[in-house]
C-alpha cells in the first residue's frame, strides 16, 4: 500500500529539518572556530596605554557612545629575514553609526612629526620602532585622534582578498603601467601578470597591490593614498554583493595575516556592525589636507611638515560632521584634497629644492633609511639625496635671491 500524502509531507519536513540543523551546526562550529582563532592567533593585547591623556580616553568613549568607532588600518610589508616590518599604508577607518557612513582617512607616511622616545621623524618610522602601539600613540599625540584600536594586515592578505573577490576593475593611466609591472617583477620575478597597456582593465590581486604601491609618478604619495582609498572602496562594494558563505570564506583566508588589539567579543560586534552598514556610502580624505603642510628636505630626506592645528580641525570635522568632507561649509584648505584628476606629471628624476633649516640637534631624529633599503624606489631616493646634498649651497643661494625662506 502506497504512502499517504501526509506521510510523504512529514518525511520531507524531517529531511529539511535535518538539513537546517546540519547547516546551523556548521555555522555554529565555524563561528566557534573563528572565535577561538581570533582569540588565540590574531589578538594582541596592548603592552602600554595607547591613549595616555585622561581627557582623550573620555573623548574616545564619548565617540563610541555616539556610534562612532575608529580603527587604524595598517598595511604591513613583512619580508622574509627581517625582524621588523614597514608600513606602506596608514588609514583611519571610521564606522559612523549616527549617519550610517563609512569614512576612510589616509595618513601620509612622510609626515614629519614628534615620536615619543625617538625625536622627530617620518610618521611611518613609529611603526618600525615600536609597532602598531607606537604608531597609534603618535597619531593620537599629534592629531588629537583618540584612536584605541588597530588592525594590521600583511599585504599578502590584501592580495588574497582581491583574488577571492574575483579582482577589481580600475583605470590604469599611461604613466602607471611601467610602475605596476616593476612591482610585479619585484615580487614574483616573472612576466605572466604584466600589464600590456593603459586603460580600464580587470586586475588580479598582485596587479592591484602593485597599483596601490605606485609612488614615483603622477602626484607621488598624494596620488598613492588616493589609489589605496579607491581600491578599498571598490572592495567594500564587492563585499556588499557576496553572500554570507562567501564572506566567511574571504575572512578565513586573511586571518593568518591579521593582527589586532580589539578584544575578541568587541571584534565580533564590530564585524556585525560593519555588516549592517552594507549599503552605507564610503567617504574619504587624507591627512595632511591641502594648504596645511610644507614640503621640506631635512637631513637629506623629503618630508611633509604639517600645520597641526588645521589638520586636527579637518580630521575632527570629517569624522564627526554629518555632511560630506567636501560640503560647502568645509574650510577652504579642505576643498581641494583630491588629485587623481590632476594633469599627469612624470616626476622621476626630479628633486625638491633643499631647504636649510635650523633645528636643535637634540630635538630632531634623522629619518631612518634602514627601513627602506630593500626596494628599488628608495635606492633612487638615496641617489637623489646625494645630488641634493652636493647642490645644497647652490639651492640655498637661489632661494635667498628669490626672497624665499623656510622655518621648521
Image (spheres, rainbow, N blue to C red):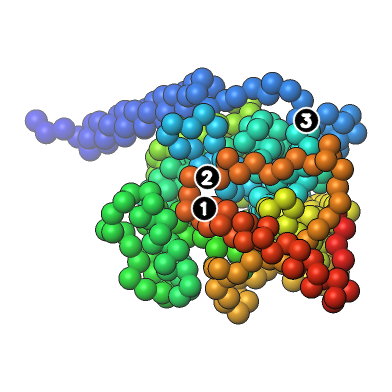
Mark earlier in primary sequence (3, 1) = 3
The local secondary structure at tag 1 comes to helix
Q: Position of residue 407 (x, y in %)?
A: 87, 58
Compared to residue 239, the image places residue 73 above or below, namely: above
Closer to the camera in the image, 208 or 328: 208
Question: Residue at label 2?
Answer: 373
Residue 157 horizontal side relative to residue 5, left or right:
right
Q: CA distance from mark 3 to mark 2?
A: 23 Å
Question: Residue at label 3?
Answer: 117
Asked if marks 3 and 2 touch (Cβ < 8 Å), the reply is: no
- Whether residue 252 is visible here, answered yes or no, is no
Q: Position of residue 199 (x, y in %)?
A: 42, 75
Q: CA distance from mark 3 to mark 1?
A: 28 Å
Asked if marks 3 and 1 touch (Cβ < 8 Å), the reply is: no
Q: Position of residue 81 (x, y in %)?
A: 44, 31
Closer to the camera in the image, 306 or 51: 306
Question: Residue at label 1?
Answer: 379
Q: Quadrant of the C terminus?
A: bottom right
| Front tag of 3 and 1 | 1
Closer to the camera in the image, 54 or 196: 196
Q: Residue at x 39, y 51 (%)?
A: 186
Q: Quadrant of the N terminus?
A: top left
Mark earlier in primary sequence (1, 2) = 2
Residue 51 horizontal side relative to residue 126, left or right:
right
Q: Residues within 10 Å of mark 1 (few under 14, many from 20)?
A: some
Circle number at residue 175:
none
Compared to residue 393, the image places residue 113 above or below, namely: above
Closer to the camera in the image, 246 or 165: 165
Amino acid at each position: 500500500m502506497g504512502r499517504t500524502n501526509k506521510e510523504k509531507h512529514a518525511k520531507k519536513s524531517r529531511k529539511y529539518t535535518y538539513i537546517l540543523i546540519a547547516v546551523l551546526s556548521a555555522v555554529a562550529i565555524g563561528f566557534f572556530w573563528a572565535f577561538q582563532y581570533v582569540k588565540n592567533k590574531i589578538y594582541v593585547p596592548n603592552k602600554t596605554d595607547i591613549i595616555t591623556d585622561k581627557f582623550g580616553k573620555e573623548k574616545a568613549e564619548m565617540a563610541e557612545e555616539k556610534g562612532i568607532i575608529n580603527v587604524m588600518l595598517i598595511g604591513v610589508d613583512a619580508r622574509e629575514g627581517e625582524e621588523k616590518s614597514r608600513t606602506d599604508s596608514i588609514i583611519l577607518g571610521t564606522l559612523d553609526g549616527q549617519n550610517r557612513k563609512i569614512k576612510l582617512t589616509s595618513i601620509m607616511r612622510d609626515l614629519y612629526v614628534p615620536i615619543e622616545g625617538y625625536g622627530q621623524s617620518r610618521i611611518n618610522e613609529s611603526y618600525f620602532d615600536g609597532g602598531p602601539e607606537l604608531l597609534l600613540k603618535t597619531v593620537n599625540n599629534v592629531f588629537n585622534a583618540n584612536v584605541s584600536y588597530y588592525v594590521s594586515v600583511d599585504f599578502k592578505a590584501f592580495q588574497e582578498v582581491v583574488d577571492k573577490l574575483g579582482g577589481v576593475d580600475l583605470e590604469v593611466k599611461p604613466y602607471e603601467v611601467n610602475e605596476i609591472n616593476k612591482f610585479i617583477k619585484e615580487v614574483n620575478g616573472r612576466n605572466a601578470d604584466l600589464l600590456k597597456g593603459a586603460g580600464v582593465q580587470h586586475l588580479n590581486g598582485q596587479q592591484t597591490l602593485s597599483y596601490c604601491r605606485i609612488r614615483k609618478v603622477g602626484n607621488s604619495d598624494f596620488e598613492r593614498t588616493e589609489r589605496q582609498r579607491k581600491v578599498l572602496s571598490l572592495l567594500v562594494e564587492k563585499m556588499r554583493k557576496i553572500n554570507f558563505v562567501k564572506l566567511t570564506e574571504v575572512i578565513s583566508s586573511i586571518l593568518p595575516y591579521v593582527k589586532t588589539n580589539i578584544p575578541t567579543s568587541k571584534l565580533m560586534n564590530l564585524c556585525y556592525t560593519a555588516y549592517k552598514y552594507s549599503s552605507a556610502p564610503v567617504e574619504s580624505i587624507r591627512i595632511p589636507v591641502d594648504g596645511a603642510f610644507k614640503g621640506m628636505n631635512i637631513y637629506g630626506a623629503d618630508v611633509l611638515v604639517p600645520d597641526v592645528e588645521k589638520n586636527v580641525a579637518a580630521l575632527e570635522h570629517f569624522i564627526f560632521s554629518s555632511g560630506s568632507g567636501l560640503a560647502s561649509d568645509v574650510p577652504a584648505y579642505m576643498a581641494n584634497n583630491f588629485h587623481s584628476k590632476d594633469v599627469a606629471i612624470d616626476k622621476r628624476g626630479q628633486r625638491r629644492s633643499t631647504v636649510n633649516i635650523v633645528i636643535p640637534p637634540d630635538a630632531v631624529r634623522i629619518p631612518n633609511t634602514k627601513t627602506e633599503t630593500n626596494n628599488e624606489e628608495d635606492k633612487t631616493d638615496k641617489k637623489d639625496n646625494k645630488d641634493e646634498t652636493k647642490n645644497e649651497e647652490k639651492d640655498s643661494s637661489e632661494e635667498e635671491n628669490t626672497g624665499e625662506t623656510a622655518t621648521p
